[in-house]
């Protein structure tokens, strides 16, 4: 019995030990390693409360779904930064030194993060902020700083694309005066410059500004031209700004207000006052795809927040806080169960001693694990690119009533596409911006032009040059010493006044001469134009040439005059004064052709008249002389010989017509050479200036000097002249041989001195005269359009005639002496006619002669050979020709008579028979 009890006891102990081992093993499998994590938030702000709640919900959801597989557990250690940089730094330092947290979620603001990330670097602890957006917090500053939100830089392109879609040329940023507000401005400025939109003014508001200080800044903005405002500040400050803007009428028609995501993400319109003050506002915010998981989370959020009225609606910062917590928990689990400890350095009991910060032994491993972490969270695809989130899609919303209406989507690939549903198609351009259904401030549907004349009716200061000479016809300044005023007039002034009258709105302005105390010019044209860049002038009007280097810092309107730089030179008279000038009217080929035709005409007349006209039938020398005399005497119609045959008369009539035209042309050309001045330029090209090394004039204070240097002219040969009278005297004195200036100056000058100077090609290209405005001036498009209207109307000619008079039309000096000479090309038709007529007469004459002497060619029978007609030769004389013909004629007659007698005898014999 005792043995049985002993056995039972042993078995009980063994069974107990077995159960203990099994339970111990199961318990070992469910052991988790706690990992301290710090949370530094502003506990008294809405975003701080929302962030803390989302962080707690993230851990609860993660461990509820993956509790059996996760060996680590994040233990949250909360600290309140109290909304200050010092509070955030103290909280982080305490967490790192005393709690030895392995990571910190937070802090909230960019200013707080700017200091806390330095502590993270020292302790090698990741700092993960889901709300610090300033571009100044670059990932290159610290390898342990993770931005679980978007860099403000990412939304700059979306803002610039929206402004570019409407063609606005100026915008004013209104931002809070801290690191969050100032960090985005340089990048915004660069993005807008790429689309030719400038920032004429930057409005800075202190984070703790009073309502009066906000009103003061808004009144200042009201007095400016620009009506496009970009608001970059927290919602708490921005809502006050909009309520004050509504109060003073700056939320009316014509204004455009654009808010960045820092305010748009927190936009709540339940408050009727805020909703009324923000009607028509355009907002930019990141796009979040709505999923079932996100809808379920939003439902849980609203259900859990019913008892906490102080927590606002869930926004994207809460989603990023949730996903950032999940990412941290996944990264901690990824590095595996290990001893999460710190290496102590210079241990000190003072919690604020920076030198005593311990260094995490797993910090670098955790940093690498965070970089490699990627998953689909409730905010979308969550992964770090350069240790910060990246998105390529932004929503553009429009405040209408109490709704935030999505009017567009911006993507890096398509800009702002026309098709909102598929986010595809061509991007919205200024010509198609009306396709965006937008309600603008003042319940307006019409697109604001982006600027207006300032409400304080401040007149524009229009700078004008002070010059004399012909250039004073463009701008003339007369100072009245008694009234201390200046009267400005001129061709350019009339054009500008007429252009401004075409604008669909009233623009007050005053002309301000660019002069010093003595009434003289205060500098060069470049100096005057630079005053526009400095803001001392609102525009410059005058004979201002549009050139490339000036357009680097100002904008020009379209030109209102001809463009180009031309060279003028004196002209010289090349009137023919040589002894052989009488040969010049006809070219050598025409002289040779005329002589040949005179000889040919003499030959034709001799052939046609030699047998019928005794005056042409004498001895051969006399025949030759008579024929030539008759031919050449037709030039003056003094021939004494009479022609008797009809063919000769026919030829003479046509020949006299040709000779009449030839002699008249010769007389006219010779008269022109002897009486009309043959003006031509003394120099004809720029190459001649360089080769001959002559002196060349250029106007004082003009860009023409730089142009001449560019043409490689010797600067020692460049002579400056002050005005057009000085230019004329410089030519008369022989100081210069040529001069360069712009066409609007040279044309009236040459018209005044037609017989003295001429313009020589080529004309060097220039931009013409235009009006100067600041870069991105909203007036520029309308003024340029007005110039087109004026230049196309007769009014432009009236201005030109009124100031420059009716300009003389100078003769074209490109016509030289050679152009007055008559060549054979002008007479080949007449020579063809007289040649054809002469040949026709010879053919008719030969035909008649052959017909009259046809009996000479009749043979005595079939075997009789008809001798050819002997060749006529002038050398044999007329007697030989007549003797030969006579002998032939007698031979033929005798032969004919013999044949006749033979036939008569034969007939008589037949009769007798």
Image: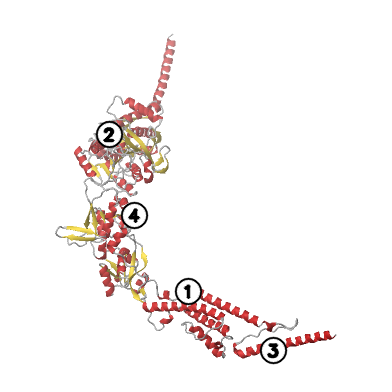
Q: Nearer the viewer, mark 2 or mark 3?
A: 3
Q: In the shown orientation, is residue 528 left or right of residue 856? A: left
- Identify which residue, 786 or 557, lies in the foreground: 786
Residue beneath disc 1? 826
Q: Which mark is residue 276?
A: 2
Question: Which residue occupies the extreme front position in the image?
Answer: 912
Cα distance in 3D space between marks 1 and 2: 89 Å
Mark 2 or mark 1, which is nearer the start of the sequence? 2
Cα distance in 3D space between marks 3 and 4: 99 Å
- Examine the image and state in which quarter residue 245 appears: top left
Q: Which mark is residue 788?
A: 4
Q: x, y (%) of residue 411?
A: 39, 41
- Judge the density around disc 2: few (<14), some (14-19), many (≥20) Cα neighbours within 10 Å: some
Residue in the image at 36% along x and 62% along y: 765
Mark 4 or mark 3, which is nearer the start of the sequence? 4
- Identify which residue, 450 or 475, lies in the foreground: 475
Residue beneath disc 3? 890
In the rendered image, the vertical position of residue 780 relative to residue 837, given as above or below:
above
Q: x, y (%) of residue 61?
A: 37, 28
Cα distance in 3D space between marks 2 and 3: 139 Å
Task: Look at the numbered discs 1 and 3 and tell me whether their residues touch, using CB distance below 8 Å.
Answer: no
Cα distance in 3D space between marks 4 and 2: 43 Å
Tell me the SS state at disc 1. Answer: helix
Task: Look at the numbered discs 1 and 4 and tell me whether their residues touch, using CB distance below 8 Å.
Answer: no
Cα distance in 3D space between marks 1 and 3: 54 Å
Residue in the image at 56% along x and 76% along y: 836
Q: Nearer the viewer, mark 3 or mark 4?
A: 3
Cα distance in 3D space between marks 1 and 4: 47 Å
Q: x, y (%) of residue 192?
A: 32, 47
């Amino acid at each position: 019995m005792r043995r049985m009890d002993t056995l039972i006891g042993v078995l009980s102990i063994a069974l107990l030990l077995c159960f203990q081992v099994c339970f111990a093993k199961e318990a070992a499998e469910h052991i988790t390693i706690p990992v301290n994590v710090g949370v530094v938030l502003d506990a008294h702000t809405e975003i701080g409360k929302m962030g803390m709640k989302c962080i707690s919900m993230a851990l609860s959801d993660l461990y509820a779904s993956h509790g059996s597989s996760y060996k680590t557990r994040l233990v949250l250690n909360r600290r309140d930064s109290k909304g200050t940089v010092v509070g955030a730094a103290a909280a982080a330092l305490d967490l790192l030194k005393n709690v030895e947290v392995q990571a910190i979620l937070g802090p909230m603001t960019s200013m707080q993060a700017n200091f806390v990330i330095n502590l993270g670097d020292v302790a090698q602890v990741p700092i993960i902020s889901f709300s610090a957006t300033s571009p100044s917090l670059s990932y290159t500053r610290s390898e342990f700083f993770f931005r679980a939100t978007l860099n403000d830089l990412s939304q700059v392109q979306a803002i610039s694309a929206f402004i570019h879609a409407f063609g606005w040329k100026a915008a004013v940023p209104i931002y809070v005066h801290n690191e969050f507000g100032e960090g985005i401005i340089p990048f915004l400025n660069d993005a807008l410059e790429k689309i030719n939109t400038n920032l004429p003014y930057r409005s800075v508001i202190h984070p703790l500004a009073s309502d009066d200080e906000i009103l003061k800044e808004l009144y200042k903005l009201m007095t400016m031209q620009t009506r496009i405002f970009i608001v970059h500040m927290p919602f708490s400050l921005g809502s006050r700004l909009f309520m004050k803007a509504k109060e003073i009428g700056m939320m009316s028609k014509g204004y455009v207000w654009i808010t960045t995501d820092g305010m748009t993400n927190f936009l709540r319109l339940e408050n009727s006052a805020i909703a009324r003050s923000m009607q028509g506002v355009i907002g930019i915010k990141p796009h979040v795809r709505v999923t079932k998981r996100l809808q379920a989370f939003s439902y849980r959020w609203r259900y859990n927040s019913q008892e906490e009225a102080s927590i606002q609606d869930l926004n994207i910062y809460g989603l990023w806080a949730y996903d950032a917590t999940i990412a941290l928990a996944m990264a901690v689990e990824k590095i595996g169960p290990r001893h999460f400890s710190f290496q102590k350095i210079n241990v000190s009991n003072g919690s604020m001693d920076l030198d005593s910060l311990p260094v995490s032994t797993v910090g670098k491993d955790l940093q690498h694990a965070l970089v490699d972490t990627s998953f689909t969270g409730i905010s979308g695809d969550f992964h770090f690119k350069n240790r910060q989130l990246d998105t390529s899609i932004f929503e553009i919303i429009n405040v209408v009533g109490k709704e935030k209406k999505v009017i567009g989507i911006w993507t890096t690939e398509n800009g702002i596409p026309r098709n909102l549903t598929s986010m595809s198609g061509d991007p919205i351009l200024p010509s198609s911006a009306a396709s965006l259904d937008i309600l603008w401030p003042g319940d307006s549907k019409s697109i604001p032009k982006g600027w207006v004349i300032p409400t304080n009716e401040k007149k524009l200061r229009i700078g004008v040059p002070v010059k004399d000479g012909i250039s004073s016809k463009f701008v003339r300044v007369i100072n009245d010493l008694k009234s201390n005023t200046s009267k400005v007039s001129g061709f350019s002034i009339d054009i500008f006044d007429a252009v401004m009258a075409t604008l669909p709105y009233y623009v007050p302005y005053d002309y301000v001469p660019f002069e010093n105390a003595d009434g003289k010019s205060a500098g060069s044209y470049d100096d005057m134009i630079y005053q526009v860049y400095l803001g001392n002038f609102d525009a410059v009007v005058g004979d201002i040439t549009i050139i490339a280097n000036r357009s680097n810092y100002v904008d020009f309107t379209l030109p209102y005059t001809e463009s180009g730089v031309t060279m003028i030179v004196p002209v010289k008279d090349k009137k023919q004064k040589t002894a052989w000038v009488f040969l010049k009217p006809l070219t050598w080929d025409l002289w040779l052709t005329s002589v040949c035709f005179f000889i040919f005409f003499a030959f034709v007349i001799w052939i046609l008249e030699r047998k019928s006209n005794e005056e042409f039938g004498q001895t051969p020398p006399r025949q030759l002389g008579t024929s030539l005399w008759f031919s050449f005497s037709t030039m003056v119609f003094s021939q004494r010989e009479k022609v008797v045959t009809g063919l000769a008369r026919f030829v003479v009539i046509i020949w006299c017509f040709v000779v009449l035209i030839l002699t008249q042309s010769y007389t006219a050309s010779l008269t022109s050479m002897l009486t009309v001045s043959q003006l031509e330029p003394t120099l004809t090209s720029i190459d001649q200036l360089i080769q001959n090394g002559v002196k060349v004039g250029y106007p004082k204070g003009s860009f023409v000097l730089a142009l001449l240097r560019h043409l490689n002219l010797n600067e020692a040969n460049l002579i400056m002249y002050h005005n057009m009278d000085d230019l004329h005297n410089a030519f008369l004195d022989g100081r210069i041989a040529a001069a360069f200036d712009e066409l609007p100056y040279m044309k009236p000058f040459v018209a005044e001195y037609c017989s003295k100077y001429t313009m020589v090609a080529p004309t060097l290209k220039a931009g013409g005269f235009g009006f100067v405005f600041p870069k991105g001036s909203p007036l520029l498009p309308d003024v340029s359009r007005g110039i087109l209207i004026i230049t196309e109307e007769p009014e432009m000619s009236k201005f030109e005639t009124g100031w420059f008079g009716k300009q003389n039309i100078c003769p074209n000096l490109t016509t030289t002496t050679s152009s007055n000479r008559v060549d054979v090309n002008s007479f080949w038709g007449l020579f063809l006619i007289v040649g054809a007529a002469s040949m026709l007469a010879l053919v008719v004459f030969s035909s008649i002669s052959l017909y009259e002497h046809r009996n000479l060619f009749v043979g005595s029978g079939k075997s009789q050979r008809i001798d050819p007609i002997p060749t006529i030769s002038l050398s044999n004389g007329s007697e030989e020709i007549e003797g030969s013909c006579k002998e032939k004629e007698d031979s033929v007659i005798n032969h004919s008579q013999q044949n006749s007698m033979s036939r008569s005898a034969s007939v008589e014999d037949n009769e007798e028979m």
